[in-house]
Amino acid sequence: MRLHNEALASVPRVIVLNRCDLPDVAEVIPRMRAYAEEREFPFFAISAATGEGLSLLIDHLGSQISKERSQPITSSEQ
């Protein structure tokens, strides 16, 4: 992302795996979780169809947005 836009390098990231209600996708959850942990990214396994995991993801995103909004804007961000 840094090559595209330097500012994107500082944007918090999260890894979300959707369709976890499907057996083929459920099989890769441990591998994706390990990938996220190695990079210290939050990981969420969700299913938009069943709603599984959505509340945890929404809580995390809401918390991150609140944290970002509570920080003062620097002159380079204006």
Image (spheres, rainbow, N blue to C red):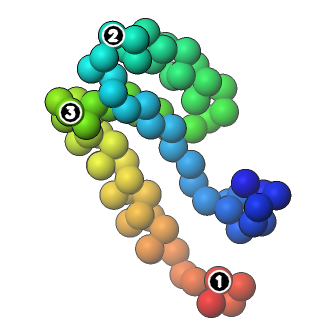
Which labelled disc corresponds to residue 49?
3
Which labelled disc corresponds to residue 23?
2
* Mark 1: amino acid: Glu
Q: CA distance from mark 3 to mark 1?
A: 38 Å
Between discs 3 and 1, the one toward the N terminus: 3
Dot 1, how many residues are within 10 Å of its Cα: few (below 14), some (14-19), or many (20+)? few
Which labelled disc corresponds to residue 77?
1
Position of 47 with respect to 45 (left or right) is: left
Viewer-side label of 3, 1: 3
Residues at discs 1 and 2 in contact (Cβ within 8 Å): no
Give percent across and percent down for residue 46. 32, 31
Between discs 1 and 2, the one toward the N terminus: 2
Name the residue at 76% across, 61% down. Answer: 4
Q: Is residue 1 visible?
A: yes
Name the residue at 62% across, 90% down. Answer: 78
Q: CA distance from mark 2 to mark 3?
A: 14 Å
Give percent across and percent down for residue 58. 30, 49
